[in-house]
Image: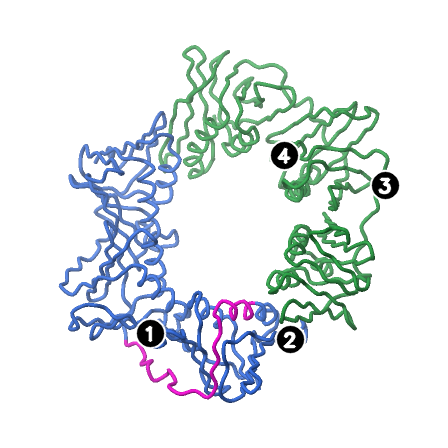
Chain colours: A blue, B green
């Protein structure tokens, strides 16, 4: 195995694949990066057993300037290999595997020889062939991930809740996540064959990594689902994640359909007020913020109180407030996550009672996106 | 105690003083920031017992827009207070101490009440009056700190070596630091009364904080020394540090005056090569890099070898190399620190033998600045 390549461009490809590689893995060979060179190009693979990222550099890629001398495959310790490639002095990297997996990396006057491992010992990625692939706009998918992944559980006591439930039916993609204290649900209408059906649970961590991997570089991504794996294909990058197995709880009945008090806010200004109030609630032991709505006077007050530390109160700017008077307490960190997911928009919060979950929706397109938060009983 | 102030400007002053405050202090009141308001202005004080920073905001400061309603003093928990001031919504902050040290912070519609402490319980800073103050150019002082502080010891086994030894005599300021494996020495000629004499040891950590505090904001700083404290005054900021007590070892005899092999390098290119070689030495257990100089052929080779990991070698670009052939091994991390302290300059390295310390000096002004490194025996 021997090739030369444009070193700065190769560093970027290594960075992409390294996202999947963890130094904490219990499978030693997965601390390595696999390089497979054919006459068509070079494939880099990184994996942490949950997710795998594969990046293909074709010989036709002008920026990569890949020149194949002889084909082959090797696994190299990922962090160490990347550090060396980054630090080498010149534009061109020469790469050659010699006897006993000894790999020589040369650039300018610097020559490294490092130990590699047999690529045959590296786990194989599944082949996912399907006719039911789905094309998604990357900005839409990244928004969907950002809006739902905040509500996945970080506790391993109910593993199924660490994932986002994705259901495709009748041309509508529904994404739901809940940690049983809060819930996030986003719908997207797709212009596709309405007979394609999916029902999968993707680990939240995988989706966060997928979102970072897609970044701003791609317009569209193709999604393919197999028995226990999902594959996202964008350009020459393939992102694999395992799926969570089991039945996701039925969530639609959790979302209230009626309300007794409603208020409209500018999401960023409400977020700023919640952030202020949470400074105080974070210093106290119960981390609770109170909202007092008095529709009669058009007043909404936010407050938090901790006998040891102090108290805070602030009159909020509302676009409108209607219905019955209400005092309700909640964890401000859930509210912050929810408000950030709306961006620079107007939102409507609908309450039923001080002990029932309340919902946040955008004032426009209010059936596409909903955040639900369970209040905290303080009496 | 009551005042109003320009909040964004006040945030900057708080940040300056907070450098001195550590949450890890064993003296509870030092987690607080002291505010003292007189008719002349507001003084903020932060301290971690080793260093103290005082910032004065005069009523005449137009950016601060300080308006005094009534004078007084209070101590507030520093981190919490700063977070609140940063998060408040409007340009103006109203500050009022009420009964029982309860302090009200208002801005726009937000009102915080937080618990304060009696300012009489806050330790007093020493008053340092002297006729022998020293004016120093801030860029020169910061360079002197950066060039010497790298060599202070981080081990508390010999506390005196955790400081930089500053000696002023005959109008020359000499700064020396050593951790017994390496040494850094810098001289500055000052245009002052040659009869002023200082001999102090300032903790390295204090000098690093001083350098950050001075930043790019000040041109000149005044230095005053008392029995066990040093004070640096710049604008309305006062920086106090305790001094280390004891006798600093005699270091001048450690610096060799002759050499048998010399080589000149461009500091940044040598640094890049050392950084590459150290990637490999860091993976092995002894962390050693070898330099082989062959003046006859004009060759300098750097190499590192670890049987478990691999090896690296690189032919270095030298400006000149003369004297006897030599192989010498050293800790590349000491070399990296030393080379960084030279910036973008040409340097000369002078060796006596494989087991004797070698020196690095700039090729110009070679009597003003010297770095010394002890080699590692590898046979």
Q: Which residues are magenta?
A: A247-275
| Camera sees residue A186 | yes
Looking at the image, which residue is at 31% across and 47% down?
Answer: A32
Crowding at dot 1, Cα within 10 Å, few <14 / some 14-19 / many 20+, comes out as some
Q: Earlier in the sequence, mark 4 or mark 3?
A: 3
For the residues beneath circles 4 and 1, the answer to whether they share a chain is: no
Left or right: B111, with A202 as reference point: right
Could you tell me residue B277's position as x and y percent?
Answer: 42, 32
Q: Is B191 colored magenta in this rendering? A: no
Looking at the image, which is closer to me, A373 or B126?
A373
Marks 2 and 3: in contact by CB < 8 Å? no
Q: Are the residues under badges 3 and 1 in a single subunit? A: no
- Label 4 sits on residue: B179
Q: Residue B375: image x %, image y %?
A: 54, 26
What is the distance, in whole Å, between disc 4 and disc 2 at their CAs? 49 Å
SS assignment at label 2: strand
- Residue under numbered circle 1: A368
The Cα–Cα distance between marks 3 and 1, rounded to whole angstroms, is 70 Å
* Front one among B283 and B25: B25
Question: Considering the numbered disc 1 on the image, is that residue within a helix, a strand or a loop?
Answer: loop
Disc 2: which residue: A306
């Amino acid at each position: 195995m021997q090739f030369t390549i444009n070193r700065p461009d190769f560093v970027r490809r290594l960075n992409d694949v390294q996202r999947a590689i963890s130094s904490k893995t219990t499978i030693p060979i997965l601390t390595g990066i696999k390089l497979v060179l054919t006459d068509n190009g070079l494939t880099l693979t990184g994996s942490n057993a949950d997710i795998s990222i594969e990046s293909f550099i074709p010989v036709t890629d002008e920026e990569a300037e890949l020149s194949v001398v002889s084909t082959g495959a090797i696994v190299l310790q990922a962090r160490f290999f990347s550090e060396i490639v980054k630090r080498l002095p010149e534009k061109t990297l020469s790469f050659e595997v010699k006897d006993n997996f000894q790999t020589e990396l040369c650039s300018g006057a610097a020559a490294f020889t490092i130990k590699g491992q047999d690529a045959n010992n590296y786990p194989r990625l599944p082949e996912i062939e399907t006719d039911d692939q789905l094309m998604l706009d990357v900005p839409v998918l990244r928004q969907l991930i950002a809006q739902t992944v905040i509500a996945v559980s970080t506790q391993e006591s109910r593993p199924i809740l660490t994932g986002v439930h994705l259901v495709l039916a009748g041309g509508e993609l529904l994404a739901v996540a809940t940690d049983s204290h809060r819930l996030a649900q986003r719908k997207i209408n797709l212009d596709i064959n309405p007979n394609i059906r999916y029902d999968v649970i993707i680990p939240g961590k995988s989706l966060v990594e997928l979102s970072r991997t897609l970044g701003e570089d791609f317009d569209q991504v193709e999604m393919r689902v197999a028995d226990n794996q999902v594959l996202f294909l964008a350009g020459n990058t393939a992102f694999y994640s395992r799926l969570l197995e089991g039945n996701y709880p039925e969530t639609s009945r959790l979302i209230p359909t009626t309300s007794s008090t409603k208020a409209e806010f500018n999401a960023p200004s409400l977020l700023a007020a919640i952030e202020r109030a949470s400074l105080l609630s974070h210093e106290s032991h119960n981390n609770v913020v109170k909202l007092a709505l008095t529709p009669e006077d058009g007043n909404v007050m936010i407050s938090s109180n901790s006998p040891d530390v102090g108290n805070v109160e602030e009159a909020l700017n509302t676009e409108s407030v209607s219905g019955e008077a209400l005092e309700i307490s909640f964890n401000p960190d859930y509210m912050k996550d929810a408000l950030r997911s709306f961006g620079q928009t107007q939102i409507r919060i609908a309450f039923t009672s001080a002990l029932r979950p309340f919902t946040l929706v955008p004032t426009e397109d209010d059936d596409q996106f909903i955040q639900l938060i369970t209040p905290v009983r303080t009496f």
